[in-house]
Image: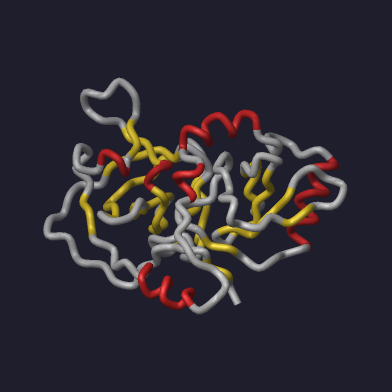
């Protein structure tokens, strides 16, 4: 059985009243492309950091945006998408500037209440916002200083192999899993033998974290 701490999943969406042109944006880090707007939705591809996507719409009540990457459509976390905007010296975060960028919005049906009700009689409760724990600013610093950059050393390969060969019960939190985010204290981490690192299967992917609970790599 999956362990769910909290997430806003989607089943239905209300059709927007107007159709707007798609907006080009860049992924600020390696970013999951999911089948739906939520952390539990299937991962159908990965958008590499600095890759260009086309944003067609964003949810009005969560930070997910519908994008197209190399001909494949899916949903990506809008906090990690940047776009050029007239009058702005630097690229801006797509989700925070949807109206200014003329990006169409849709209301995503919020199933969080149902999930909360299902968990009420179980062992978990509460809502965790992963993005609030470590957003894009943290990731920007962590990517350059992360453990797994470039070719892996033999010891680092052992860590990845151990994580892959020893899956644990997945945990789901709000937000998206990228290098640099800080895993909430409520999430239990697993030890890695003969290593200072720990791991957890978070939002559908295994991640390795350091002593500060910061994700240093997403194992794919």
* Quadrant of the drawing holding the C terminus: bottom right
104 over 39 or under it: above or below = above
Instruction: Name, please, the residue furthest toward the right.
Output: 194
The figure's colour scheme reads secondary structure
39 over 95 or under it: above or below = below
Q: Residue at x 33, y 35 (%)?
A: 83
Give left or right: position of 202 versus 162: left
194 over 173 or under it: above or below = above
Give left or right: position of 111 versus 51: left
Rendering coords of residue 167 (x, y %): 72, 65
* Quadrant of the drawing holding the N terminus: bottom right
Rendering coords of residue 24 (x, y %): 32, 40
Rendering coords of residue 87 (x, y %): 21, 23
Rendering coords of residue 196 (x, y %): 79, 42
Q: Residue at x 56, y 50 (%)?
A: 184
Instruction: Name, please, the residue furthest toward the left.
Output: 17
Q: Which residue is drawn at 79% across and 49% down?
A: 159
Q: Which residue is drawn at 61% across and 65% down?
A: 170
Q: How many labels does the image show?
A: 0
Give left or right: position of 73 versus 86: right
């Amino acid at each position: 059985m999956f362990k769910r701490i909290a997430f806003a999943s989607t089943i239905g969406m209300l059709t927007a009243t107007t159709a707007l042109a798609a907006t080009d944006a860049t992924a600020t880090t390696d970013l999951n492309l999911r089948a739906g707007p939520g952390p539990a939705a299937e991962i159908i591809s990965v958008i590499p950091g600095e890759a260009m996507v086309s944003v067609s719409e964003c949810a009005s009540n969560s930070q997910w945006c519908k994008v197209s990457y190399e001909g494949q459509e899916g949903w990506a976390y809008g906090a990690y998408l940047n776009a050029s905007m007239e009058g702005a010296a630097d690229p801006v975060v797509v989700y925070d500037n949807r109206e200014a960028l003329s990006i169409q919005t849709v209301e995503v049906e919020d199933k969080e209440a149902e999930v909360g009700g299902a968990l009420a009689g179980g062992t978990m409760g509460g809502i965790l916002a992963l993005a609030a724990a470590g957003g894009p600013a943290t990731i920007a610093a962590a990517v350059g200083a992360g453990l797994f950059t470039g070719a892996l050393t033999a010891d680092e390969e052992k860590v990845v192999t151990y994580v892959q060969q020893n899956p644990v019960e997945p945990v789901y939190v709000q937000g998206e899993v990228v290098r640099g985010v800080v895993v909430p204290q409520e999430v239990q981490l697993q030890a890695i033998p003969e290593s200072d690192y720990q791991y957890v299967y978070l939002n559908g992917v295994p991640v390795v974290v350091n002593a500060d609970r910061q994700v240093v790599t997403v194992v794919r």
